[in-house]
Amino acid sequence: MREVLAEAAFQLFLERGFEQTTVDDIVARAGVGRRSFFRYFPSKEDAVFPDHERCLADVTAFLAEAGDLEPVEAVSDAARLVLRMYSANPEFSVQRYRLTREVPGLRTYELSVVRRYEQTMAGYLRGRYGESGDGALRAEVIAASVVAAHNNGLRTWLRSGGEGDAEAAVDHALGMVRRVWGSGADGAAATPSAEGDVVVMVAAKGAPMWRVVQQIESAIGQG
Amino acid sequence: MREVLAEAAFQLFLERGFEQTTVDDIVARAGVGRRSFFRYFPSKEDAVFPDHERCLADVTAFLAEAGDLEPVEAVSDAARLVLRMYSANPEFSVQRYRLTREVPGLRTYELSVVRRYEQTMAGYLRGRYGESGDGALRAEVIAASVVAAHNNGLRTWLRSGGEGDAEAAVDHALGMVRRVWGSGADGAAATPSAEGDVVVMVAAKGAPMWRVVQQIESAIGQG
DNA sequence: GACGATATGGCACTCAGTACCCTCTGTAAA
DNA sequence: TTTACAGAGGGTACTGAGTGCCATATCGTC
């Protein structure tokens, strides 16, 4: 029944537009009572994103069992979970993307959905980094970065009409975040640049990348 | 008139709650016609954020003339502009924060407002980093990071009841973003860590910080 | 005093969302 | 077979946000 309603709603939104479609139109096409619509969807907007509630639960469950994964990797994998929901139905996702782009109300609604993913991730990261000190700050910035990167990759794919490789686009975007925030500095030496002056930096082995960066700058005296 | 309406609306929202206050209640207290309310505020929610439209214009104007400022500094300063709007009216901002926390509809609305700041910043950064390649990605991730950091500092201050130093809280939060994304690596040497193994890194002088980080990691072979 | 422009009020309407109650259907116990 | 019950769906009436349209000031200008 939920599916029947979501299907009827989406068809009508594509045909007439979101605002031009009333809930009565939807239930008429679905052949059910008006009251039943609101039993399955709290608002008209919800019918456009029928699968996000389940996906959010998946993400929450995944992070609850993320165990000893590197934190940035964990939330990146959580983001990939969301991507998979989109890439599982390319045509639907692309059509919904175009619809959402046109309708301010749907854009706003989508924001609130995305925000819940972000807060779930931030909550997980707070648990890993600690609530005190800058742990919460770092958690929120990283969560926002991961979400932004995910959305960038996702939209790149959606704009392509679902033709390209969604996973690759998002992996690439997440790579930038991981490179900056991930704790991947375990000791190594970079090859010196061929051109002109070079900088030599020394940092403690095993320090997380963000801390190395911080240390570099504070040593430079610009912190 | 706008102010009269906003004032009356806010008072009522505090007294009875947002959802328990109808537009008729507001216009009755303000002593104006119902139709006038919607002339000044497109929606009931807008009356809670009467100054964001002007602030967004300020931010846009600021970034339009940001000239040769370092990009991350420019958007950070833009965020400070937003903060100033909040800190100019501490009592109001704190009350509004508490109200917004309680009312889902207001939270969603605030999200859409914040999103516009973020997009303005991302647009500016795209202009600086270039739309092609990873310029757009970097622009969006940095914009999201700056907004997240700003909000973290702002909320810390708001939760304190407007007692602490808002500027300091936000400066501190933005510092983390600048340290990671700002181009502040102009050549220097860090003092070696006292404990155990150290890492020696060599990078081109003048390279932006994010590129240094990228270079380090790709040299490590984890990219 | 006539006139046009701009600001405001009033009225009626649509539609999302909710509260309340009804009906139907299937199930299990008597 | 009848009765009791539960749960899914339907119907009705209501509130309240937001819009369109028109009437009415109010004010500066000629």
Image (cartoon, coloured by chain):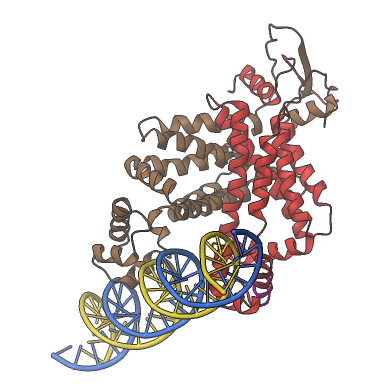
Chain colours: A brown, B red, C yellow, D blue
Front residue of A78/C6: it is C6
The spot of residue A112 in percent (x, y) is 53, 54
Would you identify the image quadrant in which residue B19 lies? Answer: bottom right
Instruction: Please say whether residue B104 is visible from this viewpoint.
Output: no
Residue B61 against residue B188 in the figure, above or below:
below
Residue B98 against residue B110 in the figure, above or below:
below
Would you identify the image quadrant in which residue B12 lies? Answer: bottom right
Front residue of A25/B156: it is A25
Front residue of A75/B48: it is B48
The spot of residue A19 in percent (x, y) is 38, 58
Q: Which quadrant would the C terminus of chain B be assigned to in this image?
A: top right
Residue A86 against residue B2 in the figure, above or below:
above
Residue at 56% x, 40% y is A148
The main secondary structure of the magenta stretch is helix
Instruction: Please say whether residue A48 is visible from this viewpoint.
Output: yes
The number of numbered badges drawn on the structure is 0
Magenta stretch contains residue B11: yes
Residue at 57% x, 69% y is B37
Residue at 82% x, 32% y is A223
Q: Which quadrant would the N terminus of chain B be assigned to in this image?
A: bottom right
Q: Is residue A121 left or right of residue D15?
A: right
Magenta stretch contains residue A106: no
Residue at 32% x, 71% y is A34
Residues drawn in magenta = B10-15
